Amino acid sequence: MEKEKNQTGRAILALVLIFAVAAAAIFGLNIVTAPIIEVNGSAAALAPLYEVMPEAKAFELLYSAEDSAASALTGVPETVMSIYGETGGMGYALRLSTSEGYTKEPIELSFAVDTEGRIIGIQVDAYPESKDFGQDSYPLSFIGKDSALADVGLVAGVTYSSSAFKNAVSDGFTALIDNGLVGAGIKGDEQILTELISTVYPGMANSAGVVQYEEQEIAEGQYKFISRSFKAINGGGYAFIVKDGESSYLALCNVSGFCAVYGTDGQEISGDADSALLDEVKSASAGAASFAENDMKKLAKLLSESAEITELPLGGIFSSVTDAFSVTDGGTQYYAFAARPYGYSNLPMAFYFVLDANGAIAAMSCDELILIPEYFTDYELDEPSYKAGFEGQSADTWDSATALISGATFSSEAAETATTDVFAAFAAMTEKGREAA
Amino acid sequence: MKNESILKSANPITILFLGACPAVAVTNNVLSALGMGIAVLAAMLLSSAIISAVKSLIPQKVKVAAYILIIAGVVSLVQLLMNAFLPDIYRMLGVYIAVSAVDLLIFSKAEETAELGFKRSMGDSLATGLVFLLALVVMAIFREILGSGSFAGLAIPFMKGYTMSLLTQPSGGLLMFAILLAVINAIRPMQAKPETSFAAAASGIYTEQNGEDEK
């Protein structure tokens, strides 16, 4: 018994001794290596800065998101992780991390500007997605640009990543300009008007606000006013940059042939626009294929055989709604709409709604709720139940959770956009809707 | 054991599936594979030396616990040293340096090492560590050249456009691991085929196959 106690005591003592020696060794080595590790950490943080500004002598930290209160800089967007000043007065270097939720992890990037606010170096430091957005070539399109980022486009097919990247660079400029470190670049009218499209024609943009269009080629002498022509990917309409003398405007036309003209301040000036200009944009958009015939067939499936469907013009509507109809079914008045918001991979989806005279959804349908089935091979969605969830809801009672398809973010957002756009179209187009509004 | 070739030795990458963890994680780049191999080799030699030196002082009933403490301590020391003096490789390896402690526990066959003389245990650890390093580097060479079109981070111009990005992914690592395992098993003599079960490997219990070293 005594011997066993001794053995246990020896065992415990041995373990305690080994633990103590190991802990002491780690503690001692930590004291020696801690300063070296700290220096390494600082050097690692600065390494991307020297890559975007290779001729820099040294950098002085002006702002760090980790300790923003200690910085004299204010109003720095959250995408900006740190701002450094080059000690020789060459300019500034920034490290950023994108915040938009459309990449699995944030994209990290660094860029440097000279004292005039022009980008002299830019690179992607970390890109978590497998889809290539041209991380080696795309940043090069930013070189030499000021805060206006004129002619810097997005990468076709990878608009979420590239717009997140571009927005982060704009955020970096915002921090520099708002704190008086560099001057703001001046945007040309054409750039301002192109950027205006997502605001005045939200139906042309995806859920991240990135406009989805293809630019049409314009032959020399083809138009008097139109200088650039953009066709919505979903076929819902056109946007034109038009020039009348020294002034430039943005003209929008929807699929119903309704056109409106906007100034660079975003205000509609259709009433003051040259009638020849309006005629030209109407004529240029006349080639837009109408969805009406197809949509009436789809809507007929939601109604009884005796239902009468009449197309209504979409006056002044630049949302995802592409068609509107007046429906009489069994003596009851309904309104029907088709909407084509962008879903997964920016592909347009097609939603069909029948609303009663009070604006409540009587029936809802969609061509494909999951656009790319191969990405969702094990996905099961009870479509009848999902669609039935919309019935009875109106603009006042709308619960956005109804549109949610678990695991299919883009389809969910498209369904949400289509529904709210249809409610807005109902409010704008019907007397009952206008009364309610 | 002494008459066996290096491939017949109980090296982890060829026999123990747990070795797949760092093998898959760090072998998409030759430099990180080399770094991991050297880190494991250094930790193995150091832990073998310490275990050989203190084996007589450790009571039988707490031997395993003591070896775990020693190996974990040694791995922590190696981790600190790498963080301080090889920061780039340390960042590449990340958490897998610490994970390698589990491998070391298995590879070092601590129970066995304790019974061997200092010289032989060091020789044993050196051989196992070197084969581990070699296996990692061989895997990394294939994965980096074919997967990324580069060698040790330097781009190979004629590989541009002919890479298989799958090999840079964990699934590609497992594929390469399986190919390497198949090749080694094919050239290993039949009698040396392992019977070590995954469960035994995972629990750190290792038994020599030919009984030569079994105590």
Image: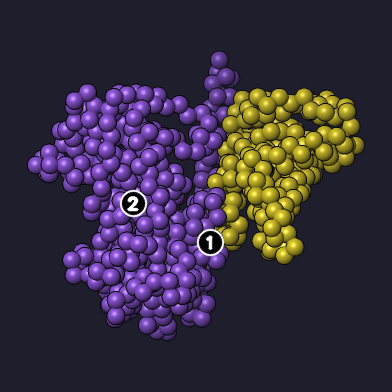
Chain colours: A purple, B yellow
Q: Provide the residue designation for mark 1.
A: A135
- Disc 1 element: loop
Task: From this view, report whether residue A362 is shown above or below residue B45.
Answer: above
Q: Give the residue at the far top of this rendering.
A: A1
Residue that badge 2 annotates: A255
Q: Which quarter of the rendering shows the N terminus of chain A?
A: top right
Q: CA distance from mark 2 to mark 1?
A: 36 Å
The answer for which chain carries disc 2 is A
The residue at 61%/57% (across/down) is B89
Q: Three-letter amino acid code at disc 1?
A: Gln
Q: Please name whichever residue, A45 or A199, is drawn nearer the observer in this view of the structure.
A: A199
* x then y, percent, for residue B42: 68, 50
Q: Name which quarter of the figure residue A430 lies in.
A: top left
Give A391 or B134, whichever is nearer the viewer: A391
- Point out residue B113 in the picture as x, y percentages from the top left corner: 73, 36
The structure residue drawn at horizontal position 59% and vertical position 51%, both measured from the top left corner, is B93
Relative depth, front residue between A68 and A35: A68
Across and down, in percent, residue A37 comes to 50, 61
A153 and B191: which is toward the camera: A153
- Helix, strand or loop status at disc 2: loop
When asked about the image quadrant of residue B110, the answer is: top right
Q: Is residue A226 visible?
A: yes
Q: Nearer the viewer, mark 2 or mark 1?
A: 2
Discs 2, 1: same chain: yes
Q: Is residue A201 visible?
A: no
